[in-house]
Each structure stands twice: as structure tokens, then as C-alpha cells.
Image: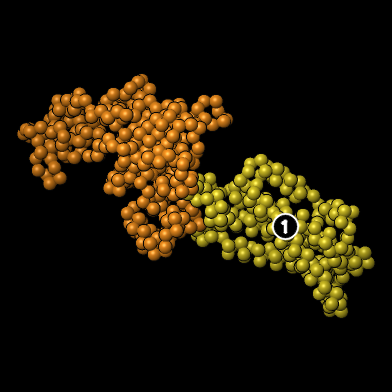
Chain colours: A orange, B yellow
């Protein structure tokens, strides 16, 4: 289960942020306020031109805001030297941007080099990071980027962003250029890794399924304004307007079921003979699919060891959708 | 005829050595001066769209000027001799080096530079560690083109008293003495081919390993 966002001192605090690019008349980001807790994965999502990438890039001052403030751990980013700020914030982009003339180890060592770490410390850090993203250091350390697959490049990209152990990471569609299978595998893996490392993450995507999967909270933007900022479950259950409703899709009830685990809604009971079987840690969407496929209203629930853990029923699934989601509003 | 050319060469060793020396010195100095001006200009313009636009246009005009015209234009201004020739040849070598520097830097994938900036590299750091090594093979290709142009262009220096192997060629033409003409033409050709080969080899060597074809 994903940890609940904690309501303490926000790690990233965005207040009344605005940005207008001279070329276009409309603001890219318009009076946006957003508070992101420590250890959260905040997904910024919306249609093209909604200001999600601009917002992210203002956090490490790749773009300077026109007005408003951004604080990281209480410090106003405009009061920190931009170069120093960027060295303290992890940065991952869609095309990865590995340096083609440097080895994998040299790429990962970029920020530690800039920070002036000694060679021995850098070498051991690089090996540890490569192992952490599941790249055998002995095999890949001295390779060049062009020798890697797309998925491997993004693993290195994430390792490079983690190198100096920044508390905050910015990720701009990091899995956007990957095939669906590689993308799903990397999403799972990095979700685990990033929780483990307790990083606060601002994650930009245009893929609602990715947002629901990765985010502890999702900020939906439109024309530079914040439309809704809430937990994935709450957004699916209570879209604030027609725009959000359309944006999350007509299958939002099914998407919501996809966020709920069978174990939480299983009830005691004896399944009838021949009932379909679902795993206790699978989601209700899969359970519903199994019930519909078998044309029954009850399935057996088993755990990893194959032991009986009760049953899941259509009625329980319906009740799960009716249950109000834990509602964390800004 | 080659026999006669060889006879001429061995009977005028000092004259040949002096001409060859002047030719090489003229070419090398012109190339060095041009590189010293064109590379920094190219780097400067690469980061400024308006300057780049101007630089590309000026360079393209420069490239279409015939070498002889440049020498002819220099003569009334600077007179004759080695230095005016050097000036004209340096001018000739500027466009290819400047254009290649500009194109080499501007051709770098913007995502690479964005990643570098986003990780906290300074503008100068990006130039030294990212842009320079990635653009270097292209810059060398520019030097290679310029070297060949300068070596062949230096033949024309003879017209404005700059010396070099062109002296044999102009004298050969004036006196209808083909052997003497060849004493100038063949070494110039060999010099140009040699420079092409040497710069080519150098270009492969300075290409970062990660960029070399597998």
C-alpha cells in the first residue's frame, strides 16, 4: 500500500506562481499554489500547454518565474544560487540526456564531480547507484550510452539524478519514450526505490494511468491553473468538474477499482465449488473481471501460499466504490 | 618532362627549399591565425541566434569570394609581400572553421545540454565538458577544409610577391616552361593531400570513444 501523505512541513511550497512567455499572450502558469509534503510523489498532469513542465522547471530555476514564490524545505529558491540549487535537486528528463562522450560511470558521477567529492568516494557511490538501479557495475561502468537500450539509459538517468542523494527530484515524463512493457517494469521498480529512499518527487506526465499509478497526489492543470489536487482515489471518486471527469476517462470507476486491493474487501465465507480464484494482493478491477468472465458473483481469495483468505463478492466490490475515499484536500 | 622537372629541382635546391619553406610557413600561419579568430567567434555566435545568423551569412559570402579576388583586393590596401599574403590567406580560412565551430556546437542534442544545465553545470562548464568535446570532430573537419584551401590558395600569393611554390608556377607559365611549373604544382598537390590525410587521422583520434562508429 502506498503511504499516506503526511501533513507536516511541506517539502516544496509553491505560492501564487505565475509565468508568461513573451511570445504568447496567455500565461503559461497562472497564480498556481501547491504544497508538496516530504516523501510525496506529486504528479503534474494535464493537456499539452497546461503549464506542467513550466511549473516543474521553475522549481530548479531552469525557467525563472514572473511572480510568486517557491520554497524547498523552507528556503526560497530565488535566494539560492541557481547553479547550487540545481546541484541539490535531482533532474530526470524524457530523452535522458546522457552525455554520449562519457562512460556510464562518468555520467553518474556528474554531480558528485561538480561538488568536488574525492575519487574513491565517487567510485564507490557510482557502483552502489548502478547496483541500486539493477545495472551490474562491473559490466556497465565503462560502457558508453550508445551501447545501452532505452530502458537501461533511463536507469542510468535516474542513477545520475540520485548521485548526490538530493531530497527532491524532478522527473519530466521519464518513461515517456519507452515501450509499454519496459515502462511498466521501470514504473514498478522506481516506485519501490523512490519510496524506499523517501524522496520528494515532482513528476510530470500526460498519461493518466501513469499518474494514478505513480502519484501519492495528482495535480491536474489546465491553461496554467490548478483544477484539482488530490489523492488518485479521490480524483477518481470525486472529479471536481466535467474537465477532470473527461480527463480521467469514462472508465474512472474501473480505474478506481484498480487502486483497491482485494484483501481489504474480502469477507469471510466458503467459496462454492468451481468459483474463480483471485490473489489477495491483486486489485478489485482484476477480481471484477474474474467474476464477470465466470458469470458468478463470488470468487475465492487466496494468499501467496495458496491458503484460503475468504471470498470477494460483487456486492463487496459495489460497496467499495460507494465508500468515500480518504479525502486529502489541499 | 618529369625528368626535366627533377633536373630543375636538383639544380636549384636552395631556391626550392626556400619556396617550400615560405609556402608551409604561410599556410600554417594563416591556418593558426584563422583558427584563433574563427573558433572563439563560432563559439560566441553559437549561443546567440542573431549573431549566428549574421555570422553564417558573412561566412557564406566569404566562401564564395574567389581566392584570387581576395588577394587582388588586399594588394591596393596592404601592398605586396609575405604579410599581405598571410592576411589574405587567413581571411580565406576563416569561413570553414567558423561555420564548422558554429554548426558543431549548435548540432548538439539540446536534451544533452538541458540535462547538463539541470544538474548544475555552469555555462563555462557546459562549454568545456560537453560542447567542446562533442563539437571537436566537426571543428576539425573545418580545419581540414581550411588547410586544403589555404595550401592551394597560397599558390596565388606569388602574384602579390608573397613567395612560396607559386613562384615556380607563375614563372613556368610566363616562360612556357612546363618542367618548372611542375616543380611548383606537384609539391603543392602533395602538401594538400598530406594535410588532408593528417587532419583526417587527427580528426579520428580526437573523436571521443563514445561517439566513434562501433
| Quadrant of the image occupied by residue A231 | top left
**Rendered position, A130 above or below A266:** below
Image point 35% across, 27% down: which residue?
Answer: A228
Which x, y percent locates residue A135? 35, 56
| Quadrant of the image occupied by residue A314 | top left
Along the viewing direction, whichever of B211 and A71 lies nearer the viewer: A71
**Rendered position, B44 above or below B199:** above
Q: Chain of mark 1?
A: B
| Farthest-out residue, bottom | B11
Q: Is B110 left, or right, of A155 in this rendering? A: right
Along the viewing direction, whichever of A288 and B69 lies nearer the viewer: B69
Along the viewing direction, whichever of A93 and A199 lies nearer the viewer: A199
Say which quadrant the N terminus of chain A sits in: top left
Which x, y percent locates residue A326? 23, 29
Q: Is B147 left, or right, of B165 in this rendering? A: left
Q: Residues within 10 Å of mark 1 (few under 14, many from 20)?
A: many
Residue that mark 1 sits on: B34
Q: SS for tag 1?
A: helix
Amino acid at each position: 500500500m502506498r503511504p499516506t501523505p503526511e501533513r507536516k512541513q511541506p517539502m516544496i511550497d509553491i505560492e501564487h506562481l505565475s509565468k508568461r512567455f513573451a511570445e504568447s499572450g496567455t500565461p503559461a502558469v497562472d497564480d498556481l499554489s501547491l504544497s508538496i509534503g516530504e516523501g510525496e510523489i506529486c504528479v503534474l498532469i494535464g493537456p499539452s500547454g497546461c503549464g506542467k513542465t513550466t511549473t516543474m522547471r521553475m522549481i530548479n530555476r531552469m525557467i525563472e518565474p514572473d511572480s510568486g514564490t517557491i520554497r524547498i524545505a523552507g528556503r526560497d529558491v530565488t535566494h539560492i544560487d541557481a547553479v547550487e540549487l540545481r546541484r541539490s535537486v535531482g533532474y530526470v528528463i524524457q530523452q535522458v540526456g546522457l552525455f554520449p562522450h562519457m562512460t556510464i560511470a562518468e555520467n553518474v558521477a556528474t554531480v558528485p564531480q561538480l561538488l568536488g567529492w574525492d575519487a574513491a568516494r565517487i567510485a564507490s557511490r557510482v557502483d552502489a547507484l548502478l547496483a541500486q538501479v539493477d545495472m551490474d557495475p562491473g559490466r556497465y561502468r565503462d560502457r558508453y550510452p550508445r551501447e545501452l537500450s532505452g530502458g537501461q539509459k533511463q536507469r542510468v538517468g535516474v542513477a545520475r539524478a540520485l548521485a548526490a542523494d538530493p531530497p527532491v527530484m524532478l522527473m519530466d515524463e521519464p518513461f515517456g519514450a519507452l515501450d509499454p512493457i519496459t515502462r511498466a517494469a521501470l514504473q514498478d521498480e522506481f516506485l519501490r526505490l523512490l519510496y524506499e529512499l523517501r524522496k520528494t518527487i515532482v513528476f510530470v506526465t500526460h498519461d493518466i494511468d501513469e499518474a494514478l499509478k505513480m502519484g501519492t497526489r495528482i495535480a491536474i492543470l489546465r491553461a496554467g491553473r490548478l483544477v484539482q489536487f488530490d489523492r488518485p482515489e479521490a480524483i477518481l471518486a470525486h472529479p471536481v468538474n466535467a474537465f477532470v471527469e473527461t480527463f480521467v476517462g469514462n472508465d474512472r470507476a474501473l480505474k478506481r477499482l484498480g487502486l483497491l486491493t482485494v484483501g481489504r474487501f474480502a469477507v469471510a465465507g466458503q467459496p462454492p465449488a468451481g468459483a474463480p480464484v483471485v490473489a489477495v494482493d491483486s486489485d478489485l478491477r482484476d477480481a471484477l473481471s474474474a467474476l464477470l468472465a465466470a458469470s458468478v458473483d463470488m470468487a475465492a481469495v487466496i494468499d501467496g501460499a495458496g491458503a484460503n483468505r475468504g471470498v470477494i463478492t460483487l456486492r463487496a466490490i459495489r460497496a467499495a466504490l460507494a465508500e468515500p475515499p480518504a479525502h486529502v484536500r489541499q | 618532362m618529369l625528368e626535366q622537372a627533377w633536373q630543375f629541382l636538383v639544380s636549384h635546391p636552395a631556391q626550392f627549399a626556400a619556396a617550400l619553406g615560405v609556402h608551409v610557413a604561410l599556410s600554417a600561419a594563416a591556418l593558426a591565425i584563422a583558427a584563433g579568430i574563427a573558433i572563439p567567434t563560432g563559439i560566441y555566435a553559437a549561443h546567440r541566434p542573431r549573431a549566428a545568423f549574421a555570422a553564417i551569412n558573412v561566412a557564406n559570402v566569404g566562401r564564395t569570394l574567389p581566392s584570387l579576388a581576395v588577394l587582388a583586393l588586399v594588394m591596393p590596401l596592404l601592398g605586396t609581400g609575405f604579410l599581405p599574403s598571410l592576411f589574405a590567406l587567413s581571411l580565406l580560412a576563416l569561413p570553414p572553421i567558423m561555420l564548422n565551430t558554429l554548426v558543431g556546437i549548435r548540432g548538439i542534442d539540446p536534451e544533452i545540454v538541458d540535462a547538463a544545465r539541470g544538474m548544475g553545470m555552469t555555462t563555462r562548464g557546459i562549454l568545456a565538458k560537453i560542447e567542446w568535446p562533442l563539437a571537436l570532430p566537426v571543428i576539425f573537419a573545418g580545419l581540414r577544409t581550411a588547410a586544403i584551401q589555404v595550401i592551394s590558395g597560397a599558390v596565388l600569393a606569388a602574384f602579390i610577391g608573397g613567395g612560396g611554390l607559386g613562384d615556380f608556377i607563375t614563372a613556368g607559365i610566363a616562360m612556357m616552361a612546363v618542367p618548372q611549373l611542375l616543380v611548383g604544382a606537384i609539391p603543392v598537390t602533395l602538401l594538400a593531400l598530406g594535410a588532408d590525410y593528417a587532419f583526417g587521422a587527427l580528426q579520428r583520434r580526437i573523436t571521443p570513444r563514445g561517439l566513434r562508429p562501433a
